[in-house]
Image (tube, rainbow, N blue to C red):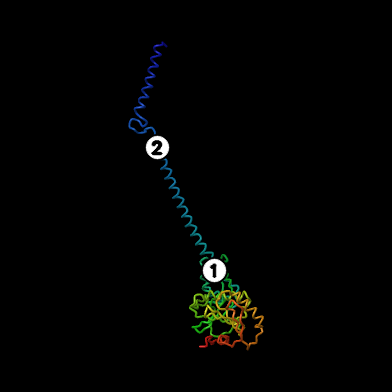
């Protein structure tokens, strides 16, 4: 190719390149309309894809939720059908009873043959048994699938006569202070009489409530300390009419002044030492003593005469410890 033609061709190419650069500079990065016409279709497609993805996820969540609800409904329906058909009560077994017959416990429980054992309330069964048979202190219900129930009962032992100052009655109580029986005749001479300032509520099978709200707590506390000191079988009377000055009657003829119901272990140990020194364990029935361990000093012992507390030890209730 001649030299002049080659030069002319290169000149044309350079002009075309410069023209394309000028067009690009004049148009700017977003084209002649000021918009990125090249990237806009990509954003639209991406937004549409995101919307399609989110919509697909929502459909999947709705489908999973609908499936879970349907499965739960079917499962509940199946369990209901199975329980109605297979778990009807056919046998009731009572164990641990001695004072009451199995028939009495069964009747008190309210259980009925044919009732679904899954619908039986253990707490309601216990409350019913406690109310009807107050000498029962504990009831445990065990379901035996598919169609039996065992009632294991534990009977409470009478622990004290609670003397209702105003009601003129004796309430047989267990160790926890639960009412078991109401009487006016003291038939059990091996349990103490507890003198109180007044019983607020006496419902058989339930813990007694007193006009003095501290009475129940102090009763349980004194009983526990007597047990710890092996004296529970030697105490005839616990006088708690004045909770700030508690008295005991030991073996029917020794009155013990405890004072406030504090430091009971110390006071009872002090009494036991004096009882050994003074031979109070061998004291004749007609002799009476008073032992004061209420103060933080050496216990004092002096002769005494029978007071009106001792009248309560008669088999027939009727004594008044105030002598009124």
What residue sits 35% from the left and 33% below the top?
35
Q: Residue 43 has which mark?
A: 2
> In the rendered view, would you say 306 is above or below 135?
below
Q: Which callout, 1 or 2, points at the residue further toward the start of the chain?
A: 2
Describe the element under mark 2 as helix, strand or loop. helix
Question: Residue 103 placed where, x, y %?
Answer: 56, 76
- In the rendered image, which quarter contains the N terminus? top left
Most foreground residue, 107 or 237: 237
Question: Residue 200 placed where, x, y %?
Answer: 48, 78
Q: Quadrant of residue 172?
A: bottom right
Q: Residues within 10 Å of mark 2 (few under 14, many from 20)?
A: few
> In this image, 210 relative to 284: left or right?
left
Question: Residue 168 placed where, x, y %?
Answer: 50, 84
Describe the element under mark 1 as helix, strand or loop. loop
Most foreground residue, 167 or 282: 282
Q: Which residue is mark 1?
A: 89
> In this image, 8 relative to 282: left or right?
left
């Amino acid at each position: 190719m001649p030299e002049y033609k080659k030069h002319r061709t290169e000149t044309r190419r350079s002009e075309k390149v410069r023209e394309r650069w000028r067009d690009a500079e004049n148009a700017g990065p977003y084209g002649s309309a000021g918009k990125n016409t090249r990237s806009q279709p990509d954003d639209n497609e991406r937004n549409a894809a995101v919307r399609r993805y989110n919509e697909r996820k929502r459909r999947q969540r709705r489908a999973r939720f609908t499936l879970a609800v349907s499965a739960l409904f079917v499962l509940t329906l199946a369990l209901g059908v199975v329980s109605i058909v297979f778990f009807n009560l056919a046998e009731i077994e009572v164990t641990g009873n001695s004072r009451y017959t199995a028939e009495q416990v069964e009747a008190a429980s309210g259980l009925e043959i044919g009732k679904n054992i899954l619908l039986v309330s253990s707490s309601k069964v216990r409350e019913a048994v406690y109310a009807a048979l107050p000498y029962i202190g504990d009831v445990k219900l065990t379901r035996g699938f598919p169609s039996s129930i065992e009632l294991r009962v534990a009977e409470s032992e009478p622990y004290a006569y609670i003397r209702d100052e105003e009601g003129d009655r004796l309430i047989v109580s267990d160790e926890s202070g639960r009412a078991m029986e109401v009487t006016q005749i003291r038939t059990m001479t091996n349990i103490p009489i507890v003198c109180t300032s007044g019983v607020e509520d006496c419902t058989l099978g339930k813990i007694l409530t007193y006009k003095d709200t501290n009475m129940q707590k102090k009763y349980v506390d004194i009983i526990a300390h007597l047990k710890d000191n092996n004296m529970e079988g030697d105490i005839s009377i616990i006088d708690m009419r004045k909770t700030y000055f508690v008295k005991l009657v030991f073996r029917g003829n020794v009155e013990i002044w405890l004072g406030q119901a504090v430091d009971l272990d110390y006071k009872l140990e002090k009494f036991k030492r004096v009882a050994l020194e003074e031979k109070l364990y061998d004291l004749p029935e007609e002799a009476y003593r008073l032992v004061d361990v209420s103060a933080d000093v050496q216990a004092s012992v002096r002769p005494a005469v029978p007071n009106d507390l001792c009248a309560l030890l008669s088999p027939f209730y009727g004594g008044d410890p105030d002598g009124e």
